[in-house]
């Protein structure tokens, strides 16, 4: 015997419409269960056994969990609700209805890859400090990042926590002197791969080196990479391969 759920819930979860929209469809006689029109939204259907049709179109069972890869733009907070700010869930289809949530946080001004799901167990695994899932960021930093900074980051720096940060990998992409009306200033582009997820971690690591992050973007998390074609504010469902790779994610060490 499979799991029985209310017909209106089944249809809403399967993406046929909101709960009130599907109720109306049912009451108007647009929905058939096993070939018979059913007008009661509360009627139970069994996911594995019953054939449910809306206007003759067979509705598949809703997946147990959904996974979206979002290219987070700046200006959105990584929360499910916020009284003041726009949340990342506003950028994901059926974000509210399915109780989706972001896996971890990116600061309001940070851009880049954010995983959104309703799979609590997977989120817990990915965020577990023991798992050390690696995250790679691109950053623009005021000042000249040096080889000495690379060495310090490789060992761990003091960001005011009980222990220094875990060894991480800092790559210098460019160091340039910019000339402006206010004078000349140095700016560096870096890539930083960390294995923890402390609050404001990248910004605090750079601060520990006496430098300020002025732009931050997450490029990857574990096996997930921000796709080049995914524009800011867009999201797409993870592929089956990506979901499998995430589920296999174990300890990723600095290479
Ligand atoms: N580190 C930060 O400082 N901010 C982020 O949003 C992510 C990592």
Image (cartoon, helix red, strand yellow):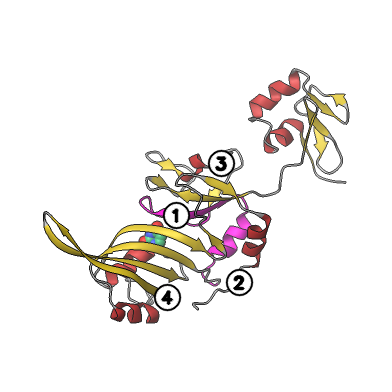
Which quarter of the picture shows residue 55?
A: top right
Query: Which residue position is annotated with label 3?
Result: 95
Tags 4 and 2 touching, CB below 8 Å: no
Question: Residue 3 at x, y = what percent?
Answer: 80, 44
Above or below for 54 versus 2? above
Question: Residue 176 at x, y = what percent?
Answer: 24, 66
| Residue density around tag 4, few if under 14, some if 14–19, many if 20 or more, within 10 Å | many
Image position of 25 (left or right of 222): right
**Frontmost residue, 193 versus 2:** 193
Question: Residue 82 at x, y = what percent?
Answer: 42, 41
Q: CA distance from mark 3 to mark 4?
A: 33 Å
Which quarter of the picture shows residue 13?
A: top right
| Residue density around tag 1, few if under 14, some if 14–19, many if 20 or more, within 10 Å | many
Tags 2 and 3 touching, CB below 8 Å: no
Looking at the image, tell me whether mark 1 or mark 3 is earlier in sequence order: 3
Residue stretch rendered in magenta on the structure? 103-130
Query: Which residue position is annotated with label 4?
Result: 168
- Please name the residue shown 40% across and 69% down the image: 192
Which quarter of the picture shows residue 199?
A: bottom left
Query: Which residue position is annotated with label 2?
Result: 250
- Please name the residue shown 38% across and 50% down the image: 108
Foreground label between 2 and 1? 1
Tags 2 and 1 touching, CB below 8 Å: no
Query: Which residue position is annotated with label 1?
Result: 112
Q: CA distance from mark 4 to mark 1?
A: 20 Å
Above or below for 224 versus 162? above
- Please name the residue shown 56% across and 71% down the image: 131
Look at the image and tell me whether residue 2 can be seen: yes
Report ligand 1 position as a quadrant. Answer: bottom left
Looking at the image, tell me whether mark 2 or mark 1 is earlier in sequence order: 1
Question: Residue 227 at x, y = what percent?
Answer: 52, 55
């Amino acid at each position: 015997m499979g799991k029985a759920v209310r017909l209106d819930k089944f249809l809403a979860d399967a993406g046929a419409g909101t709960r009130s929209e599907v109720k109306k469809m049912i009451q108007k006689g647009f929905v058939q269960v096993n070939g018979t029109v059913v007008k009661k939204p509360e009627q139970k259907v069994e996911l594995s056994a019953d054939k449910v049709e809306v206007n003759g179109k067979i509705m598949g069972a809703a997946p147990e969990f959904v996974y979206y890869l979002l290219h987070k733009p700046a200006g959105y907070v990584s929360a499910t609700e916020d009284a003041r700010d726009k949340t990342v869930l506003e950028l994901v289809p059926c974000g509210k209805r399915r109780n989706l949530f972001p896996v971890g946080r990116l600061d309001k001004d940070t851009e880049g890859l954010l995983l959104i799901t309703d799979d609590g167990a997977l989120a817990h695994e990915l965020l577990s400090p023991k798992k050390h899932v690696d995250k790679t960021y691109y950053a623009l930093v005021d000042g000249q990042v040096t080889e000495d900074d690379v060495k310090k980051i490789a060992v761990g720096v003091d960001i005011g926590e009980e222990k220094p940060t875990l060894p991480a990998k800092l790559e210098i992409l460019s160091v340039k002197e910019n000339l402006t009306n206010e004078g000349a200033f140095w700016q560096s582009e870096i890539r930083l791969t960390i294995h923890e997820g402390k609050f404001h971690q990248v910004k605090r690591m750079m601060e520990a080196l006496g430098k300020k992050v002025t732009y931050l973007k997450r490029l990857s998390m574990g096996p997930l990479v921000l796709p080049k074609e995914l524009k800011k504010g867009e999201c797409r469902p993870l592929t089956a391969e990506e979901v499998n790779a995430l589920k296999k994610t174990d300890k990723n060490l600095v290479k």
